[in-house]
Image (cartoon, grey):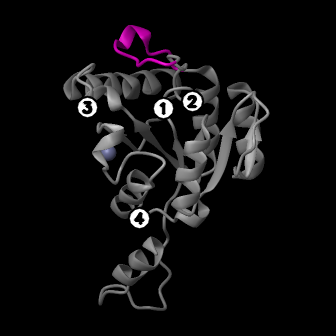
């Protein structure tokens, strides 16, 4: 539904219908458990506890090398609960960008987070696809050619709802609707190399 809307927008006077509009491809990455080490049942409340995973950096390099943008898609209910302020969270995300530039010279194109409580009934909280759809509209992303990578089935549901292919990173044997499953972040880059 969203991609047809985007195509319709592209059919303006400046873009004749016969002209193919090249849309961006993207890998959407969940944050906790994928970009950084999972904080367990709690939240990452301090930058000192935000540990970027080597496997993520390798995956980012592969995505970038194959012409995919990378965008973070994260539920951060800790903001709604008053555990972490919006300002501090966004500061951590800026530090994440700076860190990525330092270690591999690649940045996330954008970083989306849902600050709402589960009971708020917002449209952005995963497993709803609101953040991916917003990113697709803002950046002109072809969701058919894009991937969502997460460590929970909810991430898989989110990616599928947005029309993306999905990769679940989990060492547990689980029933999953994911297109691909890898057991560890250390295997992610190798798998992306094959499937992107
Ligand atoms: Zn939300």
x and y percent of residue 89 in the render? 29, 25
| Residue 188 appearing in the image | yes
- What's the CA distance linking mark 4 and mark 2? 24 Å
Looking at marks 3 and 1 on the same chain, the residue that comes earlier in the sequence is marked by: 1
Q: Pointers 2 and 1 in contact (CB under 8 A)?
A: yes
The mark nearer the N terminus, 3 or 2, is 2
Residue at 27%, 20% (x, y): give it: 84
Instruction: Label 1: state its secondary structure.
Output: loop
The span picked out in magenta is 41-52
- What residue is disc 4 on? 140
Residue at the spot x=40%, y=17% of the render? Answer: 44
Disc 3 to disc 1: CB gap under 8 Å: no
Instruction: Tell me which corner region of the image, top left, top right, bottom left or bottom right, holds residue 10.
Output: bottom left
Per the image, the residue denoted by label 1 is 31
Image disc number at residue 34: 2
Residue that lies at the very extreme toward the top in this rendered image:
48
């Amino acid at each position: 539904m969203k991609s047809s809307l985007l195509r319709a927008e592209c059919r303006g006077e400046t873009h004749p219908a016969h002209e193919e509009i090249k849309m961006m491809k993207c890998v959407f990455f969940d944050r906790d458990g994928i970009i950084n080490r999972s904080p367990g049942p709690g939240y990452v409340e301090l930058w000192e506890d935000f540990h970027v995973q080597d496997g993520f950096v390798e995956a980012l390099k592969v995505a970038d090398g194959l012409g995919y943008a990378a965008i973070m898609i994260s539920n951060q209910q800790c903001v709604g609960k008053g555990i972490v302020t919006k300002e501090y969270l966004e500061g951590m995300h800026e530090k994440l960008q700076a860190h990525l530039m330092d270690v591999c010279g690649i940045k996330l194109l954008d970083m989306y987070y849902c600050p709402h409580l589960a009971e708020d009934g917002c449209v952005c909280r995963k497993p709803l696809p609101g953040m991916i759809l917003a990113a697709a509209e803002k950046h002109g992303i072809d969701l058919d050619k894009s991937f969502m990578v997460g460590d929970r089935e909810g991430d898989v549901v989110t990616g599928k709802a947005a029309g993306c292919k999905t990769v679940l990173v989990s060492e547990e044997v689980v029933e999953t609707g994911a297109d691909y499953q890898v057991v560890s972040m250390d295997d992610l880059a190798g798998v992306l190399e094959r499937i992107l």
